[in-house]
Image (tube, rainbow, N blue to C red):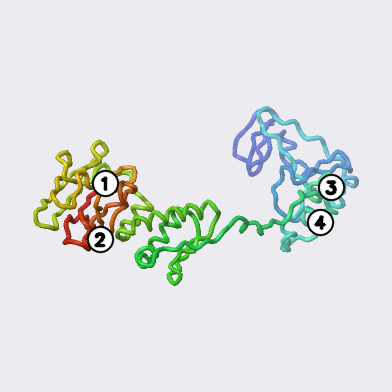
Amino acid sequence: QGQQVLGAPQAQWQGDWMPPVNGWQQQSFESWQQPPPAHHFDSGDWQPSFGFGAPHASGPSEPAFDARAAPAPAPPAPTPPGAVPVVPPQRFLPGTRKRKLCVHHANGNCRYGAECNFAHGVEDLAEDCQEAVTQKPKTERMDFSGLEAGRLTKNLTVPQDQVDSVLTAATRALLVEVTGAEIEVLKVKRALEVTGTAAQLEKAEKALQRVVAHCNWGANDAKIRSILRPRVDYKSARVRLASMAPGLKDFNRTLTADKATFSIGTDATCALKVKGPLVSRSHAVVEFQPEKGSVYIVDTSTNGTFLNGKRLPPKASAKVMLSHGDELLLQDPTHAAEFGYMVNVELS
């Protein structure tokens, strides 16, 4: 009691308990002078559960230890209250089986050979560990031959006069975006080669039909885009009609969802009153459709309404998109002078 230990702090202590110094476990003075035995085994049959709780890394094992030949170790000194007990490191006994395979040996780069703490084969594993390694889940080779199942190819043709305006890279990109199909442009065949599922082919065919139908009265990239990818955020459309013939007055009207149409004709109820020998009482109707982001014109006349030199579908049988720069004529231009308006459409 009260002795001073070489290398320890210069202090006097009472009693037989000493504080930990340089990481030594708290023990009595006599046992503190020398560290406890590095190995303590109850019998020669002891086998550690190596691999559970030990770091997962290959490394050399300690020199062989014969538990039967070693003298019986002295019982460890009691651990003082509040102290953390020292756990002796686990060591693999030569001749016993291991519990995990060496990943470095499997990759061909284990540096420790027979001294490795991990098994270099299933035969070196403990019996209760062999089943987890040998009985792996059954797998089957993946078959990708069915990926092409259900895929079809079809050529969709366009009129000859629309080849240059419709069969473009911009139109192809829009159709791919809308339909999800694979599309190639075949100008020689004046067609689009569409490859995909039956639903994709049907969607592409309907989309191209709309484009061809509206582009029959003029085509440009902006018009095709508005057909395939319509904007639905437009709240109003300002339509201005510039006279192309003497006796006609310029006209403009802003259309909204609440007031979406105006009519052209000789009747007093028409918003745009036009007098002419071939003009009907209700000759045509201009309509704004916010859900499609476009302005349309409908022929309601007897003698016909013409857009860019071509007659519109008669008797309100169909609507045709009205675009900026179109020529709206109220009589056949092949039989008489141009009688109508230049169209200016501003969407906002």
At 81% from the left and 54% from the top, the residue drawn is 63
CA–CA distance between discs 4 and 2? 87 Å
At 65% from the left and 29% from the top, the residue drawn is 82
* Image quadrant assignment for residue 232: top left
The residue at which mark 3 appears reads as 126
* Image quadrant assignment for residue 36: top right
Q: Where is residue 73 in the image (x, y as percent from the top left)?
A: 84, 40
Query: What residue type is disc 1 on?
Result: Thr
The residue at which mark 1 appears reads as 300
Q: Is residue 315 above or below residue 82?
A: below
The residue at which mark 2 appears reads as 309
CA–CA distance between discs 4 and 3? 11 Å
Q: Is residue 45 left or right of residue 310?
A: right
**Which is nearer the N-term, disc 3 or disc 1?**
3
Q: Is mark 3 on a helix, strand or loop?
A: loop
**Which is nearer the N-term, disc 4 or disc 1?**
4
Q: In the rendered image, which quarter contains the N terminus?
A: top right
Closer to the observer: label 4 or label 2?
2
Query: What residue type is disc 4 on?
Result: Gly
The residue at which mark 4 appears reads as 121
Q: Which residue lies furthest to the bottom in this view?
A: 188
**Which is nearer the N-term, disc 1 or disc 2?**
1
Closer to the observer: label 2 or label 3?
2
**Which is nearer the N-term, disc 4 or disc 2?**
4
CA–CA distance between discs 3 and 1? 92 Å
